[in-house]
Image: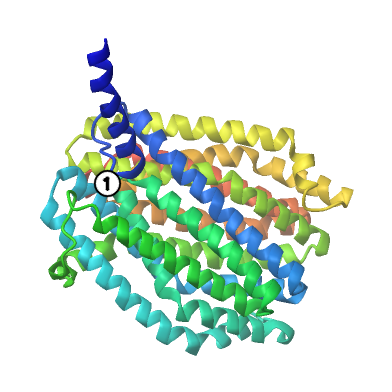
Amino acid sequence: MNQNNSSSGPAGKRGLRERMSGAVDMTTGEPWRKILAFTIPMLIGNIAQQMYSTVDSIIVGRYVGDNALSAVGSAAPILNLLLVMFVGISVGIGIIVSQYHGARDRDNLSRSIGTSITLTFAASVIVMVLAPLVSRPLLKLLHTPESIIGWCESYLLILFEGVIGSAYYNILSGILRGFGESFSALVYLLVATVLNIVLDYVFVRFLGLGVSGVALATIIAQAVSALLCYRKLRQMKEQFDSSARFLKPEKKFVTMIIRLGVPSGLTQAIFSMAMLMVQNLTNSFGEQFIAANVIVMRVDGFAMLPNFSFGTALTTYAGQNIGARRMDRVRQGAMQGTLMAVGTSAVLTGLILLFGHTLMGIFTETEELVTLSRNMMGILAAGYIAMAVTQALSGIMRGAGDTMTPMWISVITTVGIRVPLAYLLVALMHEGKAIFISLLICWLSGAALTVFFYRLGKWKKAAL
């Protein structure tokens, strides 16, 4: 008994350490366990990231004023638009890493990671040069009020000049997730979140730097998290070679990263532009409806987190198993992962509906606004379960290297269905709820199309 205990104890501890801080092999073991273990740290990280922006807004609004809060919010669409290329690189390299890691192809893994690091540097330089030239014209194009346009511009310029930290955090954490290493990415995100909150408070409350202080806090925190990710990758010598000779970009891997990543970046950009078009309709229904929309979207941000987390986990899972030529495990994991995503979303949506009135009351004491927000959230309820299916199966397709199909589904449902349907329903119903009904139909259509194309099976041919 004693001998068995002594031998199993250290092994158990080593296993725990490996699960918590090393690359996770998702090509063996029970699929649902591997998917869930990968998803939980990422979900916690996504919640932390959501809180990150929420606390940012609270500090700016409380210690600088409403105009400063408006400036930060008005800058967000431009910030998202100019950073979509990093979303693309991150998705592309994450898929490549997961597949080569699953195939145990150390040489191509090392070369693809080195190429992505160099490509990220080049993209960062482009943004740093381009952003100061286009920020103010874009702000004017969006009819940003003169009272806050100066703050918006200074906020954007600081973020873009320090974009290299944000860029490398996203790309390097994407590489870690490709290895199945979601725990370290979570830890570094939590470090960045805490550091950002502390620096926000110091720069704004004590140094009086205002909006510029918030931007400085952000780029410092992101730079620290990027350095931590890089340090972690340098320690993973068993998985890949981080020698400087692999930093020379190779056309093969640049092409692969662009082919796999650009659809995701374009999807994000198209989605952002479509939301701006729908915003015009929202504004037409007056201040109370606009406020209700803000409340619903903030709750929506948390309601969607499990769906996005399971989707990313299934991308890594599919990539590793396709790299290992284990299509049987891919199908098994797709079924189990989708069921977990749907179950989680159903429970969370049920809780939101059950406690919706109390939840909406956190944002406002106006009873009419609370009731309106709760009613609009009720319209969207079934859509969150549909989105669980969409994100899970899209994750499988992306992991196989088919990033085009999820992109086209997003374009069709957002641009082809959601935007025109919103305008049509508002014209027919003359009610604000028509906007939310159009969003629900968009989500349900997306789930139906995703299931159809997943079952069609062309994504299986897209593997590297």
Q: How is the image coloured?
A: rainbow
- Which residue: 45% across, 77% down? 162
The correct choice, above or below, for 15 with respect to 184 in the image is above
The residue nearer to you, when weighing 73 against 287, is 73
Q: Quadrant of residue 315?
A: top left
Quadrant holding the N terminus: top left
In the image, 275: left or right of 44? Answer: right
Q: Quadrant of residue 316?
A: top left
- Residue 29 in the image: above or below residue 415: above
Location of mark 1 (residue): 400
The residue positioned 41% from the left and 34% from the top of the image is 36
Image coordinates for residue 196, horizontal then vertical, percent: 56, 64
Picture coordinates of residue 285, whole percent (x, y) = 79, 62
**In this picture, is 289 found above or below 186?**
below
Q: Nearer the viewer, residue 160 or 268?
A: 160
Task: Estimate the x, y position of residue 369 in percent, counting from the top left.
Answer: 83, 52
Hey, which residue is sitting farthest front in the picture? Answer: 2
State the residue in front, 90 or 159: 159
Q: Is residue 302 left or right of residue 242?
A: right
Report x, y in % for residue 71. Answer: 67, 76
Q: Residue at x 70, y 44 (%)?
A: 377
Residue 241, located in which quarter of the rendered image?
A: bottom left
